Amino acid sequence: MSSTTYTTSTERPEDAAAIERICDDSFGGPERLTKRSYAYRQGVAPVDYLSFVVRDAAERPIATIRYWPVLVGGAPALLLGPLAVRPDHQGLGHGRWLVRHTLDIAAWANHDLVLLVGDPGYYRRLGFEPAWPYGIAMPFEDADRLLVNWLQPDRRPAIRGLVTRLPAGEDDCPSDAEGDRWRGPSRPGGAPRRAARLAHL
């Protein structure tokens, strides 16, 4: 029986167009940009060392994940999204792999909290839970779809409040030295490594 091998790597500049096509195909075209969660990404760069793609045997991106710096009650946090898989490669576990792989790196980089807006049934299996019991809310967003994953559980009592956008052009929080973690290590070469090669029958 033949197998297809996939590899995982951080984004490359030349991946940009393919990533946009994957997101359009997964979320209904450019209209996805009108979703409320996209407002938190405008004018802010994604966290580069958490921006990963899965590639097919021809090195073409077939799945993508990104994270964005936000604030929760003034504290640094990460907003996950989009997570998207090319329709003809869905159902093979690429999305779950990317979430688990990048959460490992985010925890290693000492991030406290990851948020996302998505399907609770899908993300519950990946360690996410509703945000509202912790006093966390995103204005104008469905509270049942705002989910959190506590990478540092001991920080739960300290982080609560509204999700707010990072000021445009800033890659850390000027009032909080912890904001440096958004930049992460110079390159996370010492991060825990999971196998970056996947094989599916």
Image (cartoon, rainbow, N blue to C red):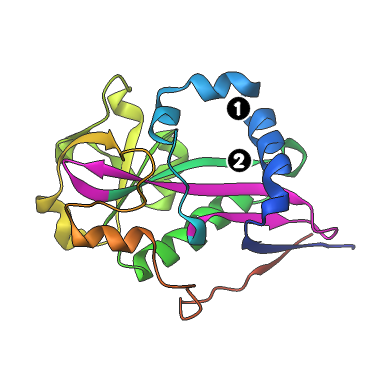
For image coordinates 32% across by 63% down, the residue present is 181
**Mark 1: which secondary structure?**
helix
The x, y position of residue 136, in whole percent, is 20, 36
Check if mark 1's residue and mark 2's residue have beta carbons within 8 Å: yes
The amino acid sitting under disc 1 is Phe
Local crowd size for mark 1, using a 10 Å CA cut-off: few (<14), some (14–19), many (≥20): some
Which image quadrant: the N terminus? Answer: bottom right
Q: Disc number at residue 84?
A: 2
Which stretch appears magenta? 50-76
The amino acid sitting under disc 2 is Ala
Asked whether the viewer can see residue 87, the reply is: yes
Location of residue 139 by image quarter = top left
Q: Please state which of residues 8 and 11 is positioned toward the viewer in this rendering.
A: 11
Q: Please state which of residues 12 and 87 is positioned toward the viewer in this rendering.
A: 12
Q: Disc number at residue 148?
A: none
For image coordinates 63% across by 52% down, the residue present is 94
Farthest left residue in view: 157
Q: Is residue 150 above or below residue 73?
A: below
The x, y position of residue 156, in whole percent, is 15, 53
Q: Earlier in the sequence, mark 1 or mark 2?
A: 1
What residue would you read off at disc 1? 27
Asked whether the viewer can see residue 111, the reply is: no
**Mark 2: which secondary structure?**
strand
Q: Say left or right for 185 vs 113.
A: right
